[in-house]
Protein backbone atom coordinates (compact mmCIF):
# COMPACT_ATOMS: atom_id res chain seq x y z
CA UNK A 1 0.00 0.00 0.00
CA UNK A 2 2.79 2.42 0.87
CA UNK A 3 4.51 1.76 -2.46
CA UNK A 4 1.29 2.40 -4.40
CA UNK A 5 0.51 5.55 -2.41
CA UNK A 6 3.98 6.92 -3.23
CA UNK A 7 3.09 6.73 -6.93
CA UNK A 8 0.10 9.02 -6.36
CA UNK A 9 2.28 12.03 -5.57
CA UNK A 10 3.52 14.44 -8.23
CA UNK A 11 7.10 13.47 -7.38
CA UNK A 12 7.00 9.69 -7.47
CA UNK A 13 10.01 7.60 -6.48
CA UNK A 14 11.44 4.95 -8.79
CA UNK A 15 9.85 1.53 -8.59
CA UNK A 16 12.42 -0.90 -10.03
CA UNK A 17 10.12 -3.90 -9.57
CA UNK A 18 7.53 -2.27 -11.85
CA UNK A 19 10.16 -0.85 -14.21
CA UNK A 20 9.21 2.75 -13.35
CA UNK A 21 11.86 5.48 -13.14
CA UNK A 22 11.49 8.33 -10.66
CA UNK A 23 9.44 11.13 -12.16
CA UNK A 24 7.80 14.45 -11.46
CA UNK A 25 4.64 14.75 -13.52
CA UNK A 26 3.15 17.87 -11.92
CA UNK A 27 1.50 19.98 -14.56
CA UNK A 28 -1.91 21.21 -15.59
CA UNK A 29 -3.26 22.20 -18.96
CA UNK A 30 -5.70 25.06 -18.53
CA UNK A 31 -2.92 27.49 -17.75
CA UNK A 32 -0.59 26.64 -20.57
CA UNK A 33 0.96 23.40 -19.38
CA UNK A 34 2.23 25.14 -16.31
CA UNK A 35 5.98 25.04 -15.63
CA UNK A 36 6.84 24.08 -19.20
CA UNK A 37 7.62 27.23 -21.15
CA UNK A 38 5.34 29.09 -23.55
CA UNK A 39 1.81 27.81 -24.19
CA UNK A 40 -1.75 28.96 -24.65
CA UNK A 41 -3.42 30.08 -21.41
CA UNK A 42 -7.17 29.63 -21.02
CA UNK A 43 -9.56 31.17 -18.46
CA UNK A 44 -10.47 29.42 -15.23
CA UNK A 45 -12.59 26.31 -15.76
CA UNK A 46 -15.58 27.85 -13.98
CA UNK A 47 -15.56 30.82 -16.38
CA UNK A 48 -15.39 28.56 -19.41
CA UNK A 49 -18.21 26.39 -18.05
CA UNK A 50 -20.34 29.51 -17.63
CA UNK A 51 -20.32 29.96 -21.41
CA UNK A 52 -22.40 26.78 -21.84
CA UNK A 53 -20.53 26.35 -25.12
CA UNK A 54 -19.70 22.63 -25.23
CA UNK A 55 -18.14 22.77 -28.74
CA UNK A 56 -15.83 25.57 -27.57
CA UNK A 57 -14.73 23.53 -24.55
CA UNK A 58 -14.01 20.56 -26.83
CA UNK A 59 -11.85 22.79 -29.02
CA UNK A 60 -9.97 24.04 -25.93
CA UNK A 61 -9.38 20.43 -24.89
CA UNK A 62 -7.99 19.68 -28.35
CA UNK A 63 -5.58 22.64 -28.08
CA UNK A 64 -4.37 21.59 -24.63
CA UNK A 65 -3.88 17.99 -25.78
CA UNK A 66 -2.04 19.03 -28.95
CA UNK A 67 0.31 21.34 -27.05
CA UNK A 68 0.99 18.68 -24.43
CA UNK A 69 1.86 16.09 -27.08
CA UNK A 70 4.04 18.60 -28.95
CA UNK A 71 5.99 19.49 -25.80
CA UNK A 72 6.39 15.81 -24.89
CA UNK A 73 7.54 14.86 -28.39
CA UNK A 74 10.03 17.76 -28.47
CA UNK A 75 11.93 16.26 -25.53
CA UNK A 76 14.60 13.61 -26.11
CA UNK A 77 13.87 10.16 -24.70
CA UNK A 78 16.60 10.69 -22.10
CA UNK A 79 15.18 14.05 -20.92
CA UNK A 80 15.23 14.87 -17.22
CA UNK A 81 11.81 14.05 -15.80
CA UNK A 82 12.15 16.65 -13.04
CA UNK A 83 11.27 19.84 -14.91
Image (tube, rainbow, N blue to C red):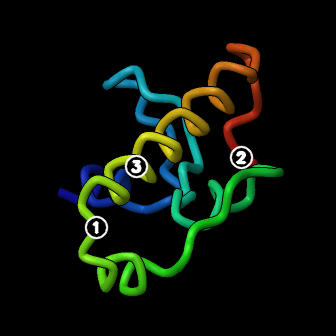
Q: Is mark 3 on a helix, strand or loop?
A: helix
Dot 1 or dot 3, earlier in sequence: 1
The percent coordinates of residue 39 (x first, y second) are 73, 51
As helix, strand or loop, the secondary structure at mark 2 comes to loop
Q: How far apart are marks 1 and 3 (CA)?
A: 13 Å
Q: Mark 1 points at which residue?
A: 53
The residue that disc 2 covers is: 82
Q: Which of marks 2 and 1 is nearer the N terminus?
A: 1
Q: Is residue 3 left or right of residue 77?
A: left
As rendered, which of 16 and 79 lies closer to the eye? Answer: 79
Quadrant where the N terminus sits is bottom left
Separation of disc 2 and disc 3 at Cα?
Answer: 25 Å
SS for tag 1? Answer: loop
Does label 2 or label 3 sit earlier along the sequence? 3
In the drawing, does residue 73 fall left or right of residue 18?
right
Q: Which residue is drawn at 40% across and 76% down?
A: 48
Q: Left or right: 49 with respect to 62?
A: left
Q: Residue 53: where, in percent of width, then height?
A: 28, 67
Q: x%, y% of residue 79? A: 75, 25
Residue furthest toward the top? 77
Mark 2: few/some/many CA within 10 Å (<14, 14-19, 20+): few
Residue 61 is marked as 3
Residue at the far right in the pictured view: 37
Please tell me which residue is depicted at 68% across the width and 32% down the height of the picture: 71
Mark 3 nearby-residue class (10 Å; few <14, some 14–19, many ≥20):
some
- Residue sitting nearer the eye, 44 or 9: 44
Q: Which of 8 and 77 is in front in this view?
A: 77
Mark 1 surroundings: few (<14), some (14-19) or many (≥20) residues within 10 A? few
Amino acid sequence: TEQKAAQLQSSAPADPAAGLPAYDWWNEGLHGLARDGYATVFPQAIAMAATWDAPLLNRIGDVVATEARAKFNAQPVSADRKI
